[in-house]
Amino acid sequence: MGVQVLDENYLGITALVLFGWNFIFFLIAYSFKFDKVTDFAGGTGFSIAALLTLLLNQTYFPRQIVMTVLVMVWSARLAGFLLWRILKWGEDNRFDDIRTNLPKLISFWTFQFLWNFIVSLTVISVNSVDTNPAIGAADIIGWIMWGIGFFFEAVGDVQKTLFKVKPEGKGTWCDAGLWKYTRHPNYFGE
C-alpha cells in the first residue's frame, strides 16, 4: 500500500506539486523577463506527475511501469527539444506581448499548469490503482499508438527544424516530409 497524501488517487498532491513546479518557473520567467525556461517547465511537468504518482503508490505493476516510462520518455524528448530550440533561437516571439505583462503571464502559466495536470490524469489514474490487472489487447494497442505518435511528433519536429534552417524555409510554411501529409505532425503525434 502506498503513501496516501491528501487523497487516495494522488490528484491533490500532484496538482500541488505541478502548481509549485510551474510557479517556480513563473517566478524565474517574470523576474528575469525571459522565456527560455517556459517550454522546459511545461514539458518536464508530465514526468514529475508520472514519477510522483508511481513512487507514492508503491505498487510498480507492469502497466504502471510501462506507462510511467512512456510518459517520461515523451516528456524528456519534448522538454529537451523545446529547450534546445529556445537556446538556439534565443527568444520566443510568442511571448513578446506577454513577457512584461503580469496578468497575461499569470494566465499563461496557469494554463500551462492545467495542461500538465489534465494531460497527466491518465497516468495519475493508472498509477493510483492498487490492483494488478492483466496486460490486455487495449494495453498493447495503446503502446503501439504511443510509438506511432512518438515517431510522428519527433520526426515532425526534426523535419520542421531542418526546413526552417534552410534559406528557402525562412518565413514559409513547412510542406516537406510528414508536413506534406498533415498540417501539424508533431501535434498529431501527441
Image (spheres, rainbow, N blue to C red):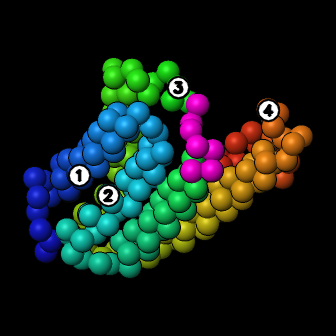
Q: Would residue 4 appear left or right of 76 to someone viewing this image?
A: left
Q: How many marks?
A: 4
Residue type at mark 1 is Val
Whether residue 18 is visible, yes or no, is: no
In three-dimensional space, the C-alpha distance between marks 1 and 3, rounded to whole angstroms, equals: 28 Å
Residue 171 numbered tag? 4
Whichever of callouts 3 and 4 sits on the residue coming sooner in the sequence is 3
Mark 2 and mark 4 residues within 8 Å of each other at the beta carbon: no
Q: Which residue is mark 3?
A: 96
Q: Is residue 88 magenta?
A: yes
Residue 17 numbered tag? 1
Residue type at mark 3 is Asp
In three-dimensional space, the C-alpha distance between marks 2 and 4, rounded to whole angstroms, equals: 37 Å
Q: Residue at position x 39%, y 20% from top?
A: 101
Whichever of callouts 1 and 4 sits on the residue coming sooner in the sequence is 1
In three-dimensional space, the C-alpha distance between marks 2 and 3, rounded to whole angstroms, equals: 30 Å
